[in-house]
Amino acid sequence: MSIGKSLGRLLSSGDVVCLTGELGAGKTCFVKGLAQGLGIRGTGVTSPTFIIIREYKGRLPLYHIDLYRIGVVADLRDIGMEEVIYGRGVTAIEWAERISDRLPGERIEITLRYEDEKTRLIEMNAFGRHHREVLKKAAGELGEITDSR
């Protein structure tokens, strides 16, 4: 959550954060941190598994999308995602790999992996100049981050 919160403070209108990882790896927990960083009050951030998209109000709107129960998505417009992704808020997409060929070119991708029962590895990649700057600033706040480029 703390990494998500640090990142959330730096996000701006139109930013897209794509989350991948095994079931239970911490994707929703990461989004809770993003929400805190965006100034969203309360603990009501939950996975929108059955309704697909939830909106939260903060400094910027946060659109939380969960594609776990979605089969094949032929067109993002079919589920209302195009308006959200290209809207004025921040969009966080869990199970983003299910629409990898339809994601915007500029985005942040976050992969969460189990290291062991209590430890997760978090890999973050930025696509586009703006998102590289956001991750660079986040690295300054968070301390040790390895850039694999």
Image: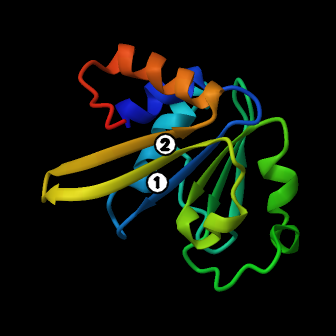
Q: Position of residue 65 (x, y in %)?
A: 65, 59
Q: Please say whether residue 35 is visible from this viewpoint.
A: yes
**58 lies left or right of 100:** right
Q: Which mark is residue 55?
A: none
Quadrant holding the N terminus = top left
- Circles 2 and 1, Cβ within 8 Å, touching? The answer is yes
Q: Quadrant of the C terminus?
A: top left
Q: What is the quadrant of residue 102 in the picture?
A: bottom right
The residues bearing labels 2 and 1 have C-alpha atoms spaced at a distance of 6 Å
User: Local crowd at mark 2 within 10 Å, few (<14), some, or many (≥20)?
Assistant: many
As drawn, the residue found furthest toward the front would be 149
Three-letter residue code for mark 1: Thr
Q: Amino acid at mark 2?
A: Lys
Q: Which residue is mark 2?
A: 32
- Front residue of 118/135: it is 135
Residue at the disc numbered 1: 28
Is residue 42 among what the camera can see?
no
